[in-house]
Image (cartoon, rainbow, N blue to C red):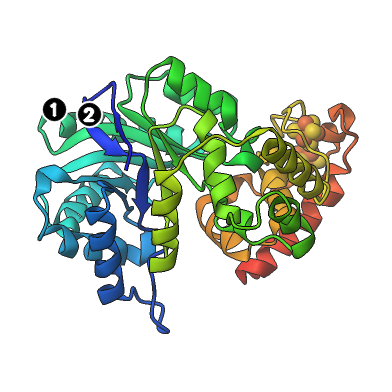
Amino acid sequence: MERKKWSTTGIETSHLGFGCMRLPINSDGKIDEPQTLRMLDRAFAAGINYFDTAYVYHNGESEIVLGKWMKNIKRENLYITTKMPMMMVNSLDQAKKIFEEQLQRLQTDYIDCYLMHGLNEGYFKTAKELGIIEYAENLKKEGKIKALGFSFHDNFNIFEEIINYRDWDLCQIQLNYMDADIQAGLKGCQLAAQKKIPLIIMEPLKGGSLTNFSDDIANILKEIDPSSSLASFAFRWFADQETTVILSGMSTMEQLNENLQIFENMTPLNAPEKKAIEKIKAIINQKVHNSCTACRYCMPCPAGVNIPQNFSLWNEFGMYHVESMIKRRWGGFMLEDVKAKHCIKCGKCEEVCPQKISIREDLAKLQKELDAICGITD
Ligand code: SF4
Ligand code: SF4
């Protein structure tokens, strides 16, 4: 397993990281602990030394199970990342309690990498206003965390603002070949490289969407190489990008073994493979609900609606139909205050939208559709 040396802390981590947000589960929805422990053992034995969890993963169980497993491993041979859940923190005292609870759950006296979880414009503001970043900086001085960073879900401009805010030790973004131009995107990847900040990639398979194509789309790649999996094309796309750790949220031993094999032979895509990926991107991009380019000419909205953020999520659903992603992001991460339902139909946004989108109509549609997926009723 290839290791990458971090310019900020000098540590060396495996290029493939183990994401602990989609661990195997039993029929009651709880983590299948014996199978998870076997997978973690296998991953570690194969050279994976970076494990990513969060306070909210598996309703808190992910940190607990990881903590049980870590007890049997020499601590200095492991790098554990967990995160401050910015989506649920309302005060500094609450943040402090959460951090202490995380140490207990993980049965450790320090966290290797600590991230502000899922920063967007709103959560970044909250983290600053409540003094949570300062608190985390003090934890680092005390040795309770070794590296401080953030994970991110918003547009490139916000990413640029956050990454330039202080000297972070790492940052984590969502990236895959379909998302090269959304959220932080490839521009974010390049900016992190330019600033020499280790970059952790999440959702390299877009929550499994890039391995679940209908046959007509999958065949575009299968025709080039029938023996390679769809996952291998998605991972190999990263061979051309500068990344430090690529996280994969693995749920089965088969996925783990397949990923290990892919990372042993991480060759860049060749020209016909790149062309096939571009063809797939074009087909999937046609499935969007509207043509919002996230240019933000319509912002700010007087009612506080984050128009491009609402459209981005809705369009993603149109492209992949992954309900779990909507439940997690619309039902969990996204601030209520910026949702479509607050639109007062003033029409200001439509006057300036270069794409001539019927913004008011689309906002009403998406609120209804995404609420229904999440089981939200007024
Ligand atoms: S029409 Fe709705 S979304 Fe557009 S600016 Fe007015 S309140 Fe905001
Ligand atoms: S102006 Fe139109 S295209 Fe630009 S972000 Fe707003 S809705 Fe999207």
Residue at the spot 30% in from the left edge and 68% down from the top edge: 36
Query: With respect to residue 138, does 245 lie above or below?
Result: below
Residue 79 is situated, as x and y percent measured from the top left of the image, at 22, 43
Q: Is residue 191 left or right of residue 288?
A: left
Q: Residues within 10 Å of mark 2 (few under 14, many from 20)?
A: some
Residues tagged 1 and 2 counted as in contact (Cβ below 8 A): yes
Residue 102 is situated, as x and y percent measured from the top left of the image, at 21, 54
Q: Is residue 75 among the parts visible in the rendering?
A: yes
Write down the residue under mark 2.
137
Q: Is residue 252 among the parts visible in the rendering?
A: no
Respond yes or no on whether mark 1 lies under 8 Å from ligand 2: no
Residue at the spot 65% in from the left edge and 49% down from the top edge: 339
- Amino acid found under the numbered disc labelled 2: Glu
Query: With respect to residue 289, does 29 lie above or below?
Result: below
Residue 113 is situated, as x and y percent measured from the top left of the image, at 26, 39
Residue at the spot 51% in from the left edge and 57% down from the top edge: 332
For the residue pair 292 and 242, the one nearer the viewer reads as: 242
* Quarter, ligand 1: top right
State the separation of the CA atoms marked 1 and 2.
6 Å
For the residue pair 135 and 80, the one nearer the viewer reads as: 80
Query: With respect to residue 351, does 247 lie above or below?
Result: below
Write down the residue under mark 1.
141
Q: Which quadrant: the N terminus?
A: top left
Instruction: Give the quarter of the image for residue 198.
Output: top left
